[in-house]
Image (tube, grey):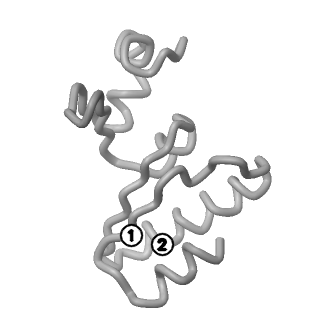
Amino acid sequence: MLAIARGLMCDPKLLLLDELTQGLAPVIIDEIVDALKLIRDRGTGMSILIVDQNMDVCLSLASRHYILEQGRIVHQASSAELAGDAIAQQRFLGVDA
C-alpha cells in the first residue's frame, strides 16, 4: 500500500502495478481493490496497468485484458468478453469458468 501511495504522490499519467495481490491477505486485497476503484472512477485520466494472476481482481478493475505468452499478446478482450469466454479462460489461463 505504501508503494502505491508513493507512486500516486507524483500524480502520474500511468500507474504500473506488478503482482498487486501476491502474498497479501484477502482483506488487504479487498482494501487495495476498493482504493483502486476510487482512483479509476474519479476520472483523473490516469491509466493503470496491472500485471497479476488473480483473475477476479483483474476482472473487477480493468476494462481491457491482454494475455501474454513469451512476450507476445495472444489474446485480448474486454472484461465482459473475458468473463464470458470459458474457452479462452481455460486455454490461456488454466481456469475452469
Indicate the amino acid at tag 2. Ile
Depth check: give the residue in front, 8 or 80: 8
Q: Which residue lies most toward the bottom here?
A: 10
SS label for mark 2: helix
Residue 47 in the image: x percent, y percent?
32, 66
| In the image, residue 83 above or below residue 56 | above
Mark 2 neighbour density, 10 Å: few (under 14) some (14–19) many (20 or more): some
Mark 1 neighbour density, 10 Å: few (under 14) some (14–19) many (20 or more): some
Disc on res. 1? none
Residue 22 in the image: x percent, y percent?
64, 47
Indicate the amino acid at tag 1. Leu
Residue 75 in the image: x percent, y percent?
24, 27
| In the image, residue 51 above or below residue 12 | above
Residue 6 in the image: x percent, y percent?
54, 83
Q: Are marks 2 and 1 in contact (CB under 8 Å)?
A: yes
Q: Quadrant of the N terminus?
A: bottom right
SS label for mark 1: strand
Q: Residue at x 33, y 40 (%)?
A: 65
Residue under label 1, please give it. Answer: 15
Depth check: give the residue in front, 1 or 65: 1
Q: If you read the primary sequence from the N terminus, does the residue marked by circle 2 or circle 1 appear first?
A: 1
Cα gap from disc 2 to disc 1, whole angstroms: 11 Å
Q: Which residue lies most toward the front here?
A: 70
Tag count in the figure? 2
| In the image, residue 29 above or below residue 56 | below
| In the image, residue 5 above or below residue 78 | below
Q: Judge depth for marks 2 and 1 and give the one in front.
A: 1
Residue under label 2, please give it. Answer: 39
